[in-house]
Image (tube, rainbow, N blue to C red):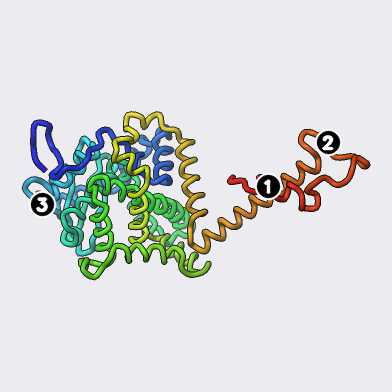
């Protein structure tokens, strides 16, 4: 990154998104939850009250004392990437960032009052500059969306569940909340992957980074198309037993599986929504207060319905077939009743004539549009 009269600018020519709202890149399920929480009166007050219970200050002191803070003097290339990402997503206050010694590649954004970003040495050593730029953008996306608050709560509740595991009912209650938060957080990771792409603006680098996280620093042994084919095979392979096992495998995770993340990001990068953002058409932060909770939930419901309809997973296909069959049955019954009694008329009286067309299933009712309802 270089300095000029306009302040910080990206180190290579990339588009910037002034005033962009996190709604522009958030996954529908993530967005509907966040919009509802932001609209909830007193929500911020409750979480600030919780801050006394959560170990946030302890975490900040821990990273300050036992990790390396990114700055002009330390890990300067990461500092430039961080400021670059904040410039592109128009995040005014640059969050502090730390590098911590851990061979496992990982990164996180936590904090209640202010977000802090932490990356491990394993991740720094694994990724090249453009791959790392996407990861930093990913974490800045978490910060812009306000995910750090909920991630901190999730960490706290997960630790609490372990401490009270000996209390049966207490543990069940906490784990129910943890499970729900994990489901939301997996969707928030898909949102942050999109933010990383908006910052890096190089889908190939994003794909390489995800492949390395899955298979290590052996790019010469890996292939993006083959990696994405794994995601397709994972989705459609097996029978109902495998579908159940997939659910059980993902429940304890805070992140979606890597191949799934890659496939989701590739799909979004080819979507009209992504192109509109790149063309400068996106929701602004100044409009967030006017966002409709109902519309956000409707979009989320529509996304899940589309997922079920297009999924190749055996269980999801079964759910879709059952829902479609129920809709066809309801439509068919509705058509028969309308033909039997007539719109706005009472039941047919004896002697009114022969059977109505469709009573035997051969008339218009059996082929009516009512059976094609998308409800």
Disc marking residue 365: none
Tag 1–tag 3 contact (CB < 8 Å): no
Q: Residue at x 21, y 35 (%)?
A: 92
Disc marking residue 331: 1
All told, the count of numbered labels is 3
In the image, 244 versus 311, the foreground residue is: 311
Residue 318 horizontal side relative to residue 341, left or right: left
Disc marking residue 75: 3
Spatial CA span between label 1 and label 3: 64 Å
Estimate the x, y position of residue 299 in percent, counting from the top left. Answer: 46, 42
**Badge 3: residue crowd in 10 Å (few <14, some 14–19, many ≥20):** some
Q: Quadrant of residue 9?
A: top left
Q: Quadrant of the C terminus?
A: top right
Tag 2–tag 3 contact (CB < 8 Å): no
Residue 95 in view here: no
Mark nearest the camera among 2 and 3 is 2
Of marks 2 and 3, which one's residue comes earlier in the chain? 3
Of marks 1 and 2, which one's residue comes earlier in the chain? 1
**Badge 2: residue crowd in 10 Å (few <14, some 14–19, many ≥20):** few
Spatial CA span between label 1 and label 2: 20 Å
Q: Secondary structure at mark 3?
A: loop
Q: Residue at x 33, y 49 (%)?
A: 269
Residue 267 in view here: yes
Q: Secondary structure at mark 2?
A: loop
**Residue wearing tag 2:** 346
Of marks 1 and 3, which one's residue comes earlier in the chain? 3
Identity of the residue furthest to the right in this view: 351
With respect to residue 72, does 42 lie above or below? Answer: above
Mark nearest the camera among 1 and 3 is 1
């Amino acid at each position: 990154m270089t300095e000029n009269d306009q302040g910080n600018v990206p180190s290579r020519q990339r588009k910037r998104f002034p005033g962009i709202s996190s709604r522009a890149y958030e996954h529908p399920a993530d967005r509907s939850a966040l919009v509802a929480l932001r609209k909830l009166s007193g929500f911020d007050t409750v979480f600030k009250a919780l801050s006394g219970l959560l170990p946030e200050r302890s975490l900040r002191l821990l990273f300050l004392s036992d990790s390396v803070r990114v700055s002009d003097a330390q890990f300067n290339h990461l500092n430039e990437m961080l400021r670059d990402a904040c410039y592109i997503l128009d995040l005014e206050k640059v969050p502090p960032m730390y590098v911590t010694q851990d061979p496992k590649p990982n990164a996180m954004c936590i904090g209640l009052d202010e977000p802090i970003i932490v990356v491990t040495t394993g991740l720094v050593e694994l990724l090249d500059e453009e791959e790392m730029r996407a990861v930093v953008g990913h974490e800045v996306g978490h910060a812009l969306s306000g995910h750090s608050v909920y991630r901190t709560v999730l960490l706290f509740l997960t630790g609490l569940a372990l401490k009270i595991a000996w209390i049966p009912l207490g543990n069940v209650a906490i784990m129910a909340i943890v499970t729900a938060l994990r489901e939301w957080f997996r969707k928030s990771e898909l949102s942050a992957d999109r933010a990383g792409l908006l910052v890096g603006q190089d889908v190939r680098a994003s794909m390489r980074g995800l492949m390395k996280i899955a298979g290590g620093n052996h790019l010469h042994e890996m292939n993006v198309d083959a990696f994405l084919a794994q995601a397709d095979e994972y989705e459609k392979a097996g029978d109902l037993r495998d579908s159940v096992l997939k659910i059980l495998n993902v429940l304890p995770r805070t992140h979606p599986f890597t191949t799934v993340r890659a496939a989701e990001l590739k799909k979004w990068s080819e979507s009209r929504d992504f192109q509109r953002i790149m063309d400068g058409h996106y929701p602004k932060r100044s409009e967030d207060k006017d966002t409709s909770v109902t519309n956000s939930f409707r979009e989320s419901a529509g996304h899940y319905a589309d997922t079920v309809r297009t999924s190749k997973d055996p269980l999801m296909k079964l759910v879709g077939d059952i829902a479609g069959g129920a809709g066809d049955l309801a439509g068919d019954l509705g058509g028969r009743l309308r033909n039997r009694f007539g719109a706005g008329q009472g039941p047919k009286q004896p002697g009114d004539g022969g059977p109505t067309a469709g009573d035997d299933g051969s008339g218009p009712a059996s082929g009516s549009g009512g059976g094609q309802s998308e409800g």
